[in-house]
Image (cartoon, rainbow, N blue to C red):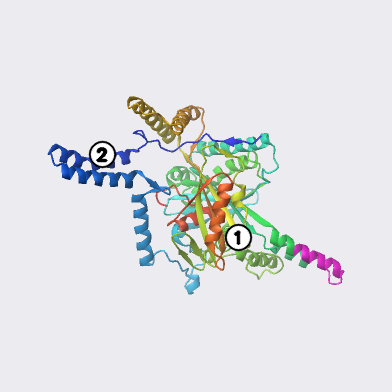
Amino acid sequence: MAVLYSDYSRARIGWFFGLSGWQLGITALAFLPIAGSIQHGSWAAAGLFAVLWVFIVLLTVTPVRGRSAIGWLSACLTFAVGGLAGWTRFRPLAARGAAEVLQEPDLPGILQGVAIHDGPPFGVTFTRTAIIQDHRAKTWAVTAAMVHPGIGLKEAHERARQGAGLSELLDLAERTELIDEVIFVVRTVPEDGAERDQYISRHRKGDGPQVARQVNDDLQNMLTTASVRTEAFVTLVAPEARLAKPAKEAGGGVDGRARVLLGAASELEAQLRGGMGMTSVNWLTSPQLALACRTGFAPGDRAGIIDALTAANTDPEVNADVPWAMAGPSGADPAARHYSHDAWNSISSTIKLPVKGAVMGALAPVLAPTGTGERRSIMVAYPILSQSAAQRQSATSEWAADIGDEMRNRAKVKQRSKSRDESDKVRRLDAKLARGNALTRPYAVCTVSAPKTARVAEYGRRLDASVRRAGFAPLRLDLAQDVAFAASTVPLGISLTRKAH
């Protein structure tokens, strides 16, 4: 029996026949010239204003691929101005021979406001976990690499238990009063065979049988081309407004914020290992995070880095670390429908939740590559509202649902099943909040990356097909491909719900 989840609803419900407050305001203001013309008996002017009013209503109310016409116009103008002025084109200082401080990140676009700090010694091994500071969004974050055995062969009760574990994780994050967003990033990349090459070089004997050598080489070629490797990360994000006071009590500065944030991370780590069944949760240091960032932009660089890490075990003169000045791409150019970085092109789409609900594990086809050299990645974010904000939103949504139902009854308008279901879900939300559950607005972004020698549009079509096969609806994030790529591929805590982003 599959575990189905469908108890989600829209963040806001329009109380006036589905219209939100600002849409109703623009519609009413645009109608004033019509009323004035009718009052003065100017019927010709009233007719012209009526045509203009219909046009304004269509621009305001009708969504086109997730945005209103006004939103599309604003985005197109911003994208055009940025492209003509050269603001969107990125060339790192290292590529121009001008990098002076290798420890400072030099990243494109929305990642330019990110700074990386070494936290105080933490845990039984006294590792210095990397603390991510986003100056633009005024947030602090920590990232962990995790390993999960998967749920493909799990029974229904085990899937339900791990799903409940995710819900408990979000509730726990809300109770810390520090974490306001939990972000999961999963990347599947073609297997490069770097570890197996190292293993063979260490264990192969020069006088071994030729047949055994040939069999191992054939196995390596077949398994490498048919295998993929999965990387999973979790990022905990806390805003400066919540960290400031506890950090002052913990000593202040970066170390004080790091202590408070790592303390909350240790609480959530227990839930990740227990309720969600993670077999490994490793909070990344600055070099490890730089490696994850670099391989996010250039998946093909991983084999060389693995070779350097292996050589560093025997030769201390080998530098296997990736400096932050070189952790970004060697060049990046956002286009309207894709993002170009290094020798790769990427296309990102968001995922719309189906009305009938989503089966746990349904996103697996989205992560399965369908072509040679293809890399897939997906980000699922859970922004968590505070209890006060959740109560206000619940009350407002319930009020809007009641007003909308009453207006339909007074106007003798039959209520559609879709709006009735949304109203019922909103009314059930108050009971859940009363029981102590956290309110979240989850969203997901998936990305496919392919070499520039291939047609990225074809890979984007395959990604959309995989999303539809999984039971969801894809929505291409045109004019925002660079932001979507950074959020879904680079585990630095980039969110699409903050106004600064």
Q: Position of residue 430 (x, y in %)?
A: 46, 28
Residue 484 within the segment the image draws in magenta: no
Residue 231 is drawn in which quadrant? bottom right
Write the start and end of the magenta stretch as one range.
202-220
The tag earlier along the polypeptide, 2 or 1, is: 2
Residue 249 in the image: above or below residue 347? above
Number of marks present in the image shown: 2
For the N terminus, the quadrant is top right
Considering the numbered disc 2 on the image, is that residue within a helix, a strand or a loop? Answer: helix
Residue 453 is drawn in which quadrant? bottom right
Q: Position of 433 compared to 358: left or right?
A: left
Give the Cα distance between marks 2 and 1: 50 Å
Front residue (pair 393, 43): 43
Residue 83 in the image: above or below residue 123? below
Pointer 1: what residue? Answer: 374
Residue 215 within the segment the image draws in magenta: yes
Front residue (pair 208, 115): 208
- In the rendered structure, which amino acid carries the disc numbered 2? Ala
In the picture as drawn, the residue positioned furthest to the left comes out as 40
In the picture as drawn, the residue positioned furthest to the bottom comes out as 97
Q: Position of residue 422 (x, y in %)?
A: 45, 33
Numbered mark located on residue 28 in the image: 2
Front residue (pair 433, 372): 372
- In the rendered structure, which amino acid carries the disc numbered 1? Glu
Q: Residue at x 61, y 37 (%)?
A: 163
Can residue 224 be seen here? yes
Packing grade of label 1 (10 A; few <14, some 14-19, many >=20) is many
Considering the numbered disc 1 on the image, is that residue within a helix, a strand or a loop? Answer: loop
- Overall secondary structure of the magenta section: helix
Packing grade of label 2 (10 A; few <14, some 14-19, many >=20) is few
